Amino acid sequence: MPSLAGLFFWMNIKLDNIKKLEVTKPLKLDCGKTVKDFPLAYETYGKLNDNKDNAILVFHALTGDQFVTGTNPITNKEGWWVTAVGPGRAIDTNKYFVVCANVIGGCMGSLGPKDINPVTKKPYGLDFPVITIKDMVKAQESLLEHLGIKKLLCATGGSMGGMQLLQFCATFPDKAFSAVPIACSSSHSAQNIALNELARQAIMADPIWDNGKYVLKNVQPKNGLAVARMVGHISYLSEKGMQEKFGRKLQEKANYEFSFNADFQVESYLRHQGYAFVERFDANSVLYITRAMDYFDLSKQFKGGLVEAFKNQKTKFLIISFSSDWLYTTKDNKDIVIALNASGADVSYSEIITDKGHDSFLLDEPEFLKTLKGFIDSMYEKFKNEKRI
Amino acid sequence: MKNLKMKKEFKVIADLLPNNTRVLDIGCGDGSLMHLLRIEKNIEVRGLELNQDNVKECIYKGLPVIQGNAETELHQFPDKSFDYVVLSQTLQAFYEPEKVLKNLLRIGKSVIISIPNFGYWKVRTKLLLFGEMPVTKTLPNTWYNTPNLHMCTIKDLFNFCDKKNIIIKKVVGVNENKTSLIRKSNLEIKNLFSKVGIFLIS
């Protein structure tokens, strides 16, 4: 196994070979600072047609990236949404042009805390400005311009991707013909913030983290980062789903070892998920992105609350929630539906009954995928007709 | 229940609705009525439906639909946010039809309700002559599996509106393919010969 420093070096070389847009337009961040001339890494799938009416923008979640489907060239693993996006899938790349950008604050090529600070000529670390969901979304607008897309057929995303999408629709009410926010919320609840804080504290408790300065030494606080990931993984499953998947099953052994090794399968699963994560993700990025999620409160941005946020909304919405999701509950999602309804927007809503928890949107969940496909295909027919008229 | 419903009923409801209005269809089923209203009357439709397969069906057709229970989730629609609210053959299936009705009148400037008429002569004879709970085309379920908790007749609903000061603008009786206007003067006879009653109230 290569050393972690070696791994990062190798990853950085690979990151030089991915699609990047140099955003020259200054971006004024919510924190007051301005960034300009920064990279926005992205990937596209399928072809933009001549009418430019088949573009779908995907927003990724906390630990996602721009490599939605196919093989991620950096990790050599499958894209994070192969279940939904690809040739013949719900979001059919034979038919649609799918675009996804890595969020700023991330670590897959877009401006983030491990990049070089032009002032100090050293990696940012905690000198990186605190970003918000709105900053992420504003940064991605330039990409649409760059690709020549005036209006998206659809924009979609789950979890933090859904939050970006709600922000996108509120900030740019005429950029998307339709939108599918999935398993998300219009603001982070106390429980959401608490879980994120747990993840952050795990990272910050790792001595290697060293106030974020580990980036200067080419190391990674992998123990803390792995624990942070484990917290996440617990919150992505439902109680029932976890019980069914693992129960009290032991990991390749007949009896307890009377030790603190991973006796139980669920322990082994969490350890595996945790340590697989440190190979592809930057600890400071987790801090910055979870912070952005915690600060997200769409109703706070608009006087008069959420209804005001969706005023004059022309976008046609489909909100999808999963019955066993306790991270972004059906109620969280329904509150968005209620606000959209109150603002007079065109909104559909479906709750998918499943035991698979928040993770459902990433899994092969047939009812969900059929609903997603049905909506996007019907929107495409409408969008084509509207453009013709 | 929805798919057994007569097409004629939808036609009557469509005729009651002016073009280019905003209509909320409660218990919209697979979206057949919404589709008809959108195509023929350029009506801006919205649906509320409990059944997930029906919701999926509406979404496939590009019809905006919210999955939810009309009994508990009507509060999400603001006052007078629709020109018309349509409730087709569902009133009798609610635990608290009076409360639902009140909500419909709050959400819509006008409300269209259709009911399977328990006063229809075949229904009456079944109970009177055979002493059995009636099973007919419009009421296809037996007593132990019917979703209908509060059956009523056209006359009952007529009197109810009167009592609650709900304005009855129009009542149409439907029997097979014939429709007729129902007024106070012909209420008794129409209550006997209509399978379905359609009320426009506000």
Image: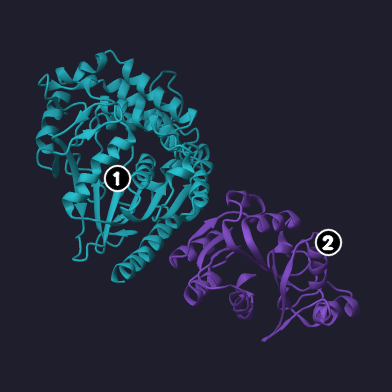
Chain colours: A cyan, B purple
Q: Secondary structure at mark 1?
A: loop
Image disc number at residue B163: 2
Q: Toward which corner of the image does residue B67 lie, by quadrant?
A: bottom right
Rendered location of residue A41, percent (x, y): 18, 41
Q: Amino acid at mark 1?
A: Trp
Rendered location of residue A205, percent (x, y): 33, 15
* Tags 2 and 1 on a common chain: no
What's the chain of the residue with tag 1?
A: A
The residue lying at 57 percent from left, 66 percent from top is: B29
The residue lying at 50 percent from left, 37 percent from top is: A326
Rendered location of residue A102, percent (x, y): 24, 40
In the rendered view, tell whether residue B161 sits above or below residue A245. below
In the rendered view, tell whether residue A121 sits above or below residue A37. above
- The quarter of the picture where the N terminus of chain B appears is bottom right
Q: Amino acid at mark 2?
A: Lys
The residue lying at 31 percent from left, 71 percent from top is: A389
Rendered location of residue B96, percent (x, y): 75, 54
How crowded pointer 1 is (Cα within 10 Å; few <14, some 14-19, many 20+) is rated as many
The foreground one among A201 and B24 is B24
Describe residue B1's horizontal placement relative to residue A326 as left or right: right
What's the chain of the residue with tag 2?
A: B
- Residue under numbered circle 1: A80
How crowded pointer 2 is (Cα within 10 Å; few <14, some 14-19, many 20+) is rated as few
